[in-house]
Every structure is written in C-alpha cells, then in structure tokens.
Image (spheres, rainbow, N blue to C red):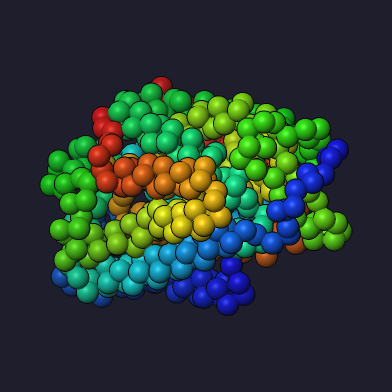
Amino acid sequence: MGKNGRFWAVALLLLLGMLLAASPVIAQTQAESAPAATADGHVWWFWPLLLFITTFIMGIFAVLGGVGGGVLFVPIISGFFPFHLDFVRGTGLLVALSGALAAGPGLLKANLASLRLAIPVALIASTCAIVGAMIGLALPTNIVQIALGGTILGICILMLTAKKSELPEVPQADALSSALRIYGVYQEASTGKVINWKVHRTPLGLCLFVIIGVMAGMFGLGAGWANVPVLNLLMGAPLKISVATSKFLLSITDTSAAWIYMNKGCVIPLMVVPSLVGIMLGSFVGVRLLKVAKPTFIRWMVIGILAFAGLKALQKGIFG
Amino acid sequence: MAETPEKSDVTLDASPEQLYYAAILEKGMYIGLLILLITYIIYIFGILDPYIPLNEISKYWSMNVDQYLHEANVHSGWAWTGMLKYGDFLNFIGVAILAGVTIMCYLSIVPILLRNNDKVYAVLAVLEALILAAAASGLVAGGH
C-alpha cells in the first residue's frame, strides 16, 4: 500500500471508528421512535461498542504479539461475549480476510509475498477451508467449542516451542518446486543484501495445507499461526517471504470459507463492521507502538490470554 | 542458504502478473471498504430502515444460525440481494466485494500467464477462481 493509500485507508477507518464511538449519540437521536433497551437489558449499541473497543485493543496486541487478528478474535469473543459461535466464526473470517486484503497489495508489490508460492498452496488450502467450514457448521456447537479450545491450546504450545529460521538451509529444490518454478529473490532492507531463495519438501508442505485449510474453515481462525512454520521451517522459505506469503494466503483461504459462512447466514453487520474497523485501527496503532514496546513481554501476554481463552472455550464446550 | 538458484528469470522486481494481481486487489479492497463505510452510515443513522430493528438484534445473535434464520425469517444464500432496501442488508454489498475481489484477481492474471506460456499456472488460476466461485455461489453449504 502506498503512502497515499495508507492515508486514505486510515482516514476511512478513523471515520468509521468515530461513528462507532458516537453510536450512543446516534442512538439517542433514534430513541424517540424505538425503545433503547434490548432483550438482554443493555442498549443496542452496548455490545457493538464493547466489541469495537475490544477488537481495537486486540489489533494492537496482535501486531505486538506477532499473531493474526483472527486467532485472537474467535476464542476471546466467543468466550466472553454473548454471540453464538456461528456468528463469531463468520465475523472472525471476515476480520482475518480484511487484514490480509489490506496487507496483500503492498506485500505483493514489494515482492515479499510470492504469488508463485501462494497459488498452488492456496488452491489446496482454500478447497480444504470449504470442507472445514462445512464440517464446522454441521457439527454440534459444543463439539466445535471443545475442538476450538484444544486447537487454541495447541497454538499456545506451538508459539512457545516453534523456532524460526531467518534463512533456512535448502540444499536442493525438490522436483515439484523446480517444475513450478517456485523460487525468487529479495533484498534484505536492513543489510542491503540480495537473497536468493528456493523451497524443498513441497509435496509434504502441500499435504499439511490440507489440514491447515480444514482448521481455518472449521474454526474461522485465519491460519497464519500454521502457515508460517510450514513455509519457513518445513519448506525452507526465508522468514520474511514466509510471513508475507502467509499473510497474502489468508486473503485466498479465508475468502472461500467466508463465502460458506456468509451464504449460511452467519454474518450480522452490527458485529462485523465494529470488529473489522476496531482490529484494523488497532493494527495501525500497534505498528506505531512496535518501535517502543517490549515484544517478548507482549508475546508472553498474548500466549497467556490465548491459553485462558482456550480453556474458556473448553469449559463452554464441556459444561455449556 | 547453501546455494543460489541460477535462473535467468529471477529478478528483484515482482512479476507482471503479481503486480497486476496486487493492483486489482488494492482497488477492490478500497472500493469494498468505502462501500462498507457508506452503507454502515446509512444503517446506523437509520437513513434506510433495517429489516431487524437495532434494539432486537441481541435476541438473535446468541442463537445458532439455523434458529436465527428461522426466528428472524431470513433466507440464506444470495437472498440478501433481494433485501437491499433494508439498511442492515445493504452492508452485505461491501462484505461481498471484499470476499469477491480475489476471484477477480485470479481471473485477471490468466491472460498474462497464457501470454507468458505459463500454462500450468494459468490452469491453477482458473481452478482457484472456479473453487472460490463455487463457494460464493452457495452451491456448497453446511448446516447444523
């Protein structure tokens, strides 16, 4: 995204944010024609406003903790808000999708996200995300909650144990990646060094994207937490290429699953817009704070919050 | 990294299809976001009446989706296109653009790939567009 583009995106989001923050005033003007209190005793704007504030904070923490917004959104919102998991997953996918759409053009133009790497991977992941979404919508909610809780706790373990490799050793590209010409070159901004990259173990990597796609669709989580380790540690793409391609990949994987949830009716605009704007604005603030924050402490905090949300999902699934 | 791929087509610049894809994605994202902004203003300012009054939504969002559709008498799939006179359903236009832009991106790069004789990737791009279109069409669906 260019500087002008970024300015307009932030301006648009700020305007939406101000509207959301001003929704109590707007509600006041409409109060004459309709009673303000709802079935749960709160005024109608209470939960959307709380959702906006929560997702704004979530957006900051997502950037500082190095995770996607979707992976925080689904367990936290389904655990602590009165929304049914069906709508939380639908919204979570749109949140992850919007973040990926906003980042994708810039990453592609900078040649950090690789379209050649993404296209075969996305074909498998997006097809499996459709299957995952269908399974997720067909299973009883408590089973999905339990599986979600288990997955979130697994993600915490992955975040605690997984190593990252700036420039993995790839002795030789495999036959499939050579045939598909999956390789590239980028310039490391900090050193100015030009780095050539290629990948190996492509068939195994593609097989793992079957599981990643199913899980992304089933839980509406986004899948950056799984994409990056597979691209970086297994297939040997440099960390920057892996992170950027993973972010771009979400725009494709989550598109397929989002359509399934949208066609099923799991989209409530009063939930979607505050969440989307909150998390995007929070991400912009998070990027600014990145320069002064202590990422290690925040990463530990994010893992702690995720673990708590995972346990809450398990508790909801088991005890209702 | 042990070895450098010695390929003549490797450059620091993104490929033409990648740049084209990025340009379409960027436009679609801005258009989707802008429409979402406008329709949300229309919705919360009550410029168009919503199908479900704002103070009744909390009755539905704690139900599962099948119950919600039944209780609120909302139809799934593309039925929302017939309900655009309501402020809440108007928001689906922006959401659909954000969810649909990737299909346009894939279709737009097929001619470039074919021009470069990159038939395998052209086929993969068409397949991906078909998969996403199938998901968008509502032909494949899940349910409780």
Residue drawn at 37 percent across, 41 percent down:
B131
Above or below: residue A159 compared with residue A111: above
Instruction: Judge left or right: residue A123 versus residue B86.
Output: right
Residue drawn at 44 percent across, 33 percent down:
A128
Residue A171 spot, x, y in % from top left: 81, 32
Residue A281 spot, x, y in % from top left: 53, 64
Viewer-side residue, A136 vs A145: A136
Residue A256 spot, x, y in % from top left: 40, 44
Quick check: can you spot residue A70? no
Instruction: Judge left or right: residue A63 versus residue A56.
Output: right
Residue drawn at 24 percent across, 53 percent down:
B57
Residue drawn at 27 percent across, 36 percent down:
B141
Above or below: residue B93 compared with residue A183: below
Quick check: can you spot residue A7? yes
The quadrant of the rendering that contains the C terminus of chain A is: top left
Above or below: residue A63 compared with residue A158: below
Viewer-side residue, A83 vs B69: B69
Which image quadrant is residue B2 in?
A: top right
Residue B58 spot, x, y in % from top left: 26, 50
Viewer-side residue, A13 vs A289: A13
The quadrant of the rendering that contains the N terminus of chain A is: bottom right
Above or below: residue A215 compared with residue A89: above
